[in-house]
Protein backbone atom coordinates (compact mmCIF):
# COMPACT_ATOMS: atom_id res chain seq x y z
CA UNK A 1 0.00 0.00 0.00
CA UNK A 2 1.41 3.43 -0.89
CA UNK A 3 2.57 5.83 1.78
CA UNK A 4 0.29 8.86 1.72
CA UNK A 5 1.21 12.11 3.46
CA UNK A 6 -0.79 15.24 4.18
CA UNK A 7 0.98 18.50 4.96
CA UNK A 8 -1.29 21.02 6.68
CA UNK A 9 -1.40 24.13 8.85
CA UNK A 10 -3.31 24.17 12.12
CA UNK A 11 -5.15 27.45 11.42
CA UNK A 12 -5.54 26.87 7.67
CA UNK A 13 -9.26 26.93 6.79
CA UNK A 14 -8.67 24.84 3.65
CA UNK A 15 -6.82 22.23 5.70
CA UNK A 16 -9.60 22.14 8.27
CA UNK A 17 -12.15 21.64 5.49
CA UNK A 18 -10.14 18.66 4.20
CA UNK A 19 -9.79 16.84 7.56
CA UNK A 20 -13.29 15.27 7.54
CA UNK A 21 -12.68 14.15 3.95
CA UNK A 22 -9.38 12.54 4.94
CA UNK A 23 -11.14 10.79 7.84
CA UNK A 24 -13.87 9.58 5.46
CA UNK A 25 -11.29 8.36 2.94
CA UNK A 26 -9.47 6.36 5.61
CA UNK A 27 -12.73 4.76 6.80
CA UNK A 28 -14.06 3.96 3.33
CA UNK A 29 -10.87 2.72 1.68
CA UNK A 30 -8.71 1.47 4.55
CA UNK A 31 -6.04 3.93 3.43
CA UNK A 32 -3.90 5.64 6.01
CA UNK A 33 -2.76 9.23 5.50
CA UNK A 34 0.06 10.48 7.72
CA UNK A 35 -0.75 14.03 8.79
CA UNK A 36 2.09 16.50 9.26
CA UNK A 37 1.35 19.95 10.68
CA UNK A 38 3.96 22.29 9.16
CA UNK A 39 3.17 25.78 10.47
CA UNK A 40 4.08 25.05 14.10
CA UNK A 41 6.31 21.98 13.78
CA UNK A 42 9.71 22.66 12.26
CA UNK A 43 10.52 18.96 11.88
CA UNK A 44 7.40 18.49 9.76
CA UNK A 45 8.19 21.68 7.81
CA UNK A 46 11.66 20.28 7.08
CA UNK A 47 10.06 17.04 5.88
CA UNK A 48 7.82 19.00 3.52
CA UNK A 49 10.79 21.04 2.27
CA UNK A 50 12.66 17.80 1.57
CA UNK A 51 9.95 17.01 -1.01
CA UNK A 52 10.14 20.52 -2.59
CA UNK A 53 11.36 19.24 -6.02
CA UNK A 54 8.32 16.96 -6.23
CA UNK A 55 5.71 19.25 -4.67
CA UNK A 56 6.39 22.67 -6.16
CA UNK A 57 5.89 21.72 -9.85
CA UNK A 58 2.50 20.22 -8.94
CA UNK A 59 1.50 23.00 -6.53
CA UNK A 60 1.83 26.18 -8.55
CA UNK A 61 5.57 26.57 -8.02
CA UNK A 62 5.41 26.85 -4.25
CA UNK A 63 4.98 24.87 -1.04
CA UNK A 64 1.49 25.36 0.30
CA UNK A 65 -1.10 23.64 2.43
CA UNK A 66 -2.94 21.42 2.25
CA UNK A 67 -0.72 19.23 0.12
CA UNK A 68 -1.06 15.48 -0.32
CA UNK A 69 1.83 13.28 -1.44
CA UNK A 70 2.13 9.64 -2.45
CA UNK A 71 5.77 8.80 -1.64
CA UNK A 72 5.76 5.72 -3.89
CA UNK A 73 4.63 7.43 -7.07
CA UNK A 74 5.75 10.98 -6.17
CA UNK A 75 2.28 12.13 -7.17
CA UNK A 76 0.98 15.19 -5.33
CA UNK A 77 -2.23 17.19 -5.21
CA UNK A 78 -2.63 20.55 -3.53
CA UNK A 79 -5.38 22.67 -2.09
CA UNK A 80 -8.94 22.11 -1.03
CA UNK A 81 -10.76 19.67 -3.30
CA UNK A 82 -13.94 17.60 -3.48
CA UNK A 83 -13.92 14.19 -1.83
CA UNK A 84 -14.12 12.41 -5.20
CA UNK A 85 -10.87 14.04 -6.39
CA UNK A 86 -9.06 13.15 -3.14
CA UNK A 87 -10.29 9.56 -3.34
CA UNK A 88 -9.32 9.24 -7.00
CA UNK A 89 -5.79 10.49 -6.20
CA UNK A 90 -5.40 8.24 -3.14
CA UNK A 91 -6.61 5.05 -4.81
CA UNK A 92 -4.82 5.14 -8.16
Image (cartoon, grey):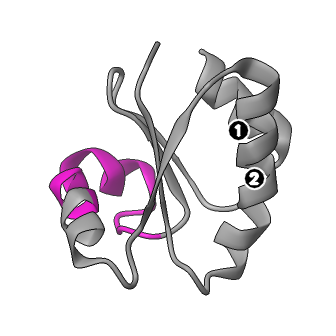
Left or right relative to 71: residue 11: right
Q: Are marks 2 and 1 in contact (CB under 8 Å)?
A: yes
Q: Earlier in the sequence, mark 2 or mark 1?
A: 2
Q: Quadrant of the C terminus?
A: top right
Question: Which corner quadrant of the image does residue 77 belong to?
Answer: top right
Left or right relative to 45: residue 60: right
Residue 84, magenta (yes or no): no
Residue 22's disc is: none
Left or right relative to 49: residue 2: right
Rendering coords of residue 57 (x, y %): 34, 51
Q: Residue at x 36, y 68 (%)?
A: 63
Q: Residue at x 54, y 39 (%)?
A: 33
Residue 81's disc is: 2
Q: Using the image, determine if residue 62 lies above or below residue 28.
A: below
Residue 59, magenta (yes or no): yes
Q: Using the image, determine if residue 30 lies above or below residue 66.
A: above
**Badge 2, how many Cα within 10 Å: few under 14, some, many 20+?**
some
Q: Residue at x 74, y 20 (%)?
A: 29
Q: Residue at x 83, y 42 (%)?
A: 83
In the picture of the structure, the residue carrying the numbered disc 1 is: 86
Tell which of 34 and 86 is nearer to you.
34
Span colored in magenta = 48-64
Amino acid sequence: MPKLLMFHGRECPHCRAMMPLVDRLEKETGSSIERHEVWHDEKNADLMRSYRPILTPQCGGQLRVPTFLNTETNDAVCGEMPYEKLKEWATK
